Structure formats: C-alpha cells, structure tokens
Image (spheres, helix red, strand yellow):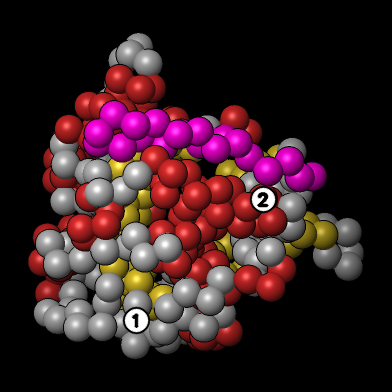
Amino acid sequence: MILCCGEALIDMIAEPTVSGARGFVPHTGGAILNTAVAMGRLGESVGMLTGVSTDMFGQQLINALKASHVDVSHVIVSDRPTTLAFVQLEDGHATYSFVDENTAGRMLAPEDMPDQLPAISALYLGGISLACEPCADAYASLLAQHGNDRPVMLDPNIRPGFIQDQTRFRTRLNRMIAQSDIVKVSDEDLDWIIPGAEPEAAKAALLLQAGPSALIVTRGGDGANGYLADGSQVTVPVKPVQVVDTIGAGDTFNAGVLTGLSRAGHLTKPAVRNLTANSLRAAMELGAEVAAVTVSRAGAEPPWDHEL
C-alpha cells in the first residue's frame, strides 16, 4: 500500500447563493488528500497519514477518503479544528487564503508518527505540510525513519507565503530531497529551490546530484519534463481539454505517475533506481491523462479508473 503523508483540509469555494450573493461551500481538499483520492479511484492500494479533526469537517474528510477506497487506519484524530482554505477562482485559476492556526493537521509532532509501517510499500509526501511547523518536522522525521526501506516520492509544492524561516525550510527540504527517490516540482518550484538564470536541464542535473533517481518538472500548459540520474530526459505533453479550473491538477498528475509506476512493477527501491526513460514516460503519460480529466471538471474531482 502507498501511504500519502500530508494535509487533508476543506476548500471553501465561492459559489452563488439563492439571494445572488456569493457564499462559500465546503469541499474536501488538500494536495495530499487529492492525490490519495485519485489513486484510490484508479484502483491503487493507498492509505492516508494526516491529522484530522473530530469536528464536522473532519468527518467530511474521513467520509471522502473512505468513499474513494483510501485506507484511514493511519489517520491521527484530535479535537483541534480543521484547516480551511478559502478559494477564489479567476479565469479558472485558484488563489487561496488559509485558516490554519492550531489545527489538527498542522499540530502533528514527530512523536505522533508511527514507529512501524509493516504494510506500506511506498511513501508519498509533499504539500503545505512540509512548510507549516510543527507538522513539517513530523513528516521529515517520518521520512528519515522509514524512507530507507521503501521508495519515496516528494512534491514540495512550494508556497512562499507559508515559509516563516526560509533558512530552516530550505535546510529541511534539501534533506528530504536527498532522502527521496522521485521528486516532482513545478517549473516555479525548481526556480525557487535553485535560483538563477541557468536552464531547466542544468538545474535538474544539480537537484539529481543531491540523491534522487528521477525528477519531474511540470510546466502547466506546456506539459512536463522528466529527468533521470543517468542523464536521460523525456517530455510529455498535456492532453488537450476544455479547462474548467486547475484545482487539483498537479495532485492528480502525481497520482497517475505513482499508479503507473506501481502497475508496471517499478515502484520498488531497486526499480526506481534503475528506471528507464520509457518507464518514466509511460508513468508521466498516465499522470497527464488523469490530470486532463480533473481540469475539465469543477474542483478537485479526479476520475475513476473506468472513466479513462
């Protein structure tokens, strides 16, 4: 089972009310939850490790995970509130305002992390949970303890507004990148991690020198590039669709990549280290296919396997 580790929250999305004024409707969200839900719908064995509240929004999150066949045995429940993300859409692109103080997800600590993960075959980490403390330290400790025994995919999904201490964040993130097997970043993320005017391929080579076997760089409407430690490079275009909004696009792309690797038998430590360009391309193509369906729908609504 692949364990997705990170935030599960409520997206409060503005919608018209009966009176004509705009109200906010609660939808399940969070980058890591979206990836877990997408994998569950694709038929992959997947679980979620996160902090969830006992409040009504927490129950909504649990119900959504179960409805998409995501295992919740690693969810950590507390009476702290649920993280809320108020979403504004402009021309299909989302901007967020977060309410995240003292929440069930954010307040996870290293001592809350499991000592044993006997049924877990791979780890996926990322999202704002890597920037918000103390949960960022909790997930870093989880990776340090359990990342040597199973393949790890990391998507930092960098949001500078969440970073209070840039030096501390960079130190922790660089350590986690070095402990990961596959790193996925947007082109903006890559430029933040490695500032400067060097071309993308040069920055990719620098990042891979830190330890990962594969790097995937998503470029919005320009598709995605994949880089391997042996110098190989692949490019996968986006699937042309009518875009409704981009909520959850990168998250479901990640789900497709992980599912593609798993289906092909490549989601093991040795297999990832010896990944070929063709294998990486095939996994990225499934990621692009899944993401295309998601952006053609309102909100983070990834497809079920039969819809592909």
* Quadrant holding the C terminus: bottom right
231 vs 218, nearest the viewer: 231
Q: Is residue 44 rendered to the left or right of residue 134?
A: right
Instruction: Determine if residue 114 is in view.
Output: yes
Instruction: Give the answer, above or below, for where 65 lies relative to 143.
Output: below
Rendering coords of residue 215 (x, y %): 34, 40
What residue is disc 1 on?
75
SS state under label 2: helix
- What residue is at 41 percent from the left and 84 percent from the top? 71
Q: For marks 1 and 2, give the CA distance.
A: 29 Å
301 vs 21, nearest the viewer: 301
Residue 203 quadrant:
top left
Which residues, given as a range, are shown in magenta?
Answer: 223-242
SS state under label 1: loop
Instruction: Give the answer, above or below, for where 145 lies relative to 250.
Output: below
95 vs 5, nearest the viewer: 5
N-terminal of the two: label 1 or label 2?
1
Rendering coords of residue 226 (x, y %): 41, 37
For badge 1, the amino acid type reads Val
Residue 258 quadrant:
bottom left
Q: Is residue 153 rendered to the left or right of residue 287?
A: left
Q: Is residue 5 rendered to the left or right of residue 169?
A: right
Residue 224 on the magenta span: yes
Rendering coords of residue 204 (x, y %): 31, 29
| Disc 1 residue crowd, few under 14, some 14–19, many 20+, Cα 10 Å | some
For badge 2, the amino acid type reads Ala
Instruction: Determine if residue 132 is in view.
Output: no
| Disc 2 residue crowd, few under 14, some 14–19, many 20+, Cα 10 Å | many
What residue is disc 2 on?
292
Q: Is residue 69 rendered to the left or right of residue 305?
A: left
